Image (spheres, rainbow, N blue to C red):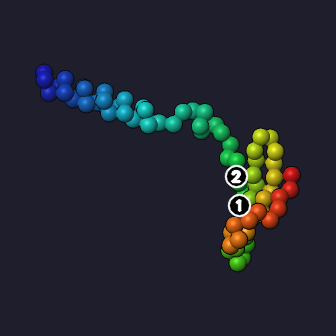
Amino acid sequence: MKKTQSIILLLFLTTSAIAQQMARLEEYGDLPTISQIAVSPSGNRIAYRNITNDMDAVVVQDLALGKFLGGTL
């Protein structure tokens, strides 16, 4: 009887810990803000699509210089 109670308690605690670590449903429904990433042949620049606050932009960034080179809406 005591062994059965211990197993039930262990299962309850394990299930509770797993439930706390699970992501909320809303987190799965969010669309990515950065997508369509492309790297230049030299590897020095990247271009990507960035969506923030209903604004859609293509951003170009120089990784060697750490600067944004431009973007379009």
Q: Quadrant of residue 66?
A: bottom right
Query: Relative to residue 12, is residue 53 drawn left or right?
Result: right
Instruction: Provide residue 51's location: percent of width, then percent of height.
Output: 76, 47
**Looking at numbered disc 1 in the image, what kind of residue is underneath it?**
Ile
Residue at the spot x=75%, y=44% of the render? Answer: 52
Residue at the spot x=25%, y=30% of the render? Answer: 10
Q: Is the residue 64 above or below the residue 17 in the image?
A: below
Element assignment for label 2: strand
Q: Quadrant of the N terminus?
A: top left
Query: Relative to residue 36, is residue 23 drawn left or right?
Result: left
Can you see residue 39? no
Which residue corresponds to mark 2? 34
Residue at the spot x=19%, y=23% of the render? Answer: 5
Which residue corresponds to mark 1? 37
Mark 1 to mark 2 CA distance (whole Å): 8 Å
Say whether marks 1 and 2 touch (CB < 8 Å).
yes
Q: Residue furthest top?
A: 1
Can you see residue 72? yes
Instruction: Provide residue 6's location: percent of width, then percent of height.
Output: 19, 27
Instruction: Provide residue 48's location: percent of width, then percent of height.
Output: 74, 59
Residue 4 numbered tag: none
- Tally the numbered discs: 2
Depth order, front residue of 35/8: 35
**Looking at numbered disc 2 in the image, what kind of residue is underneath it?**
Ile
Query: Relative to residue 64, is residue 57 drawn left or right?
Result: right
Q: Quadrant of residue 11?
A: top left
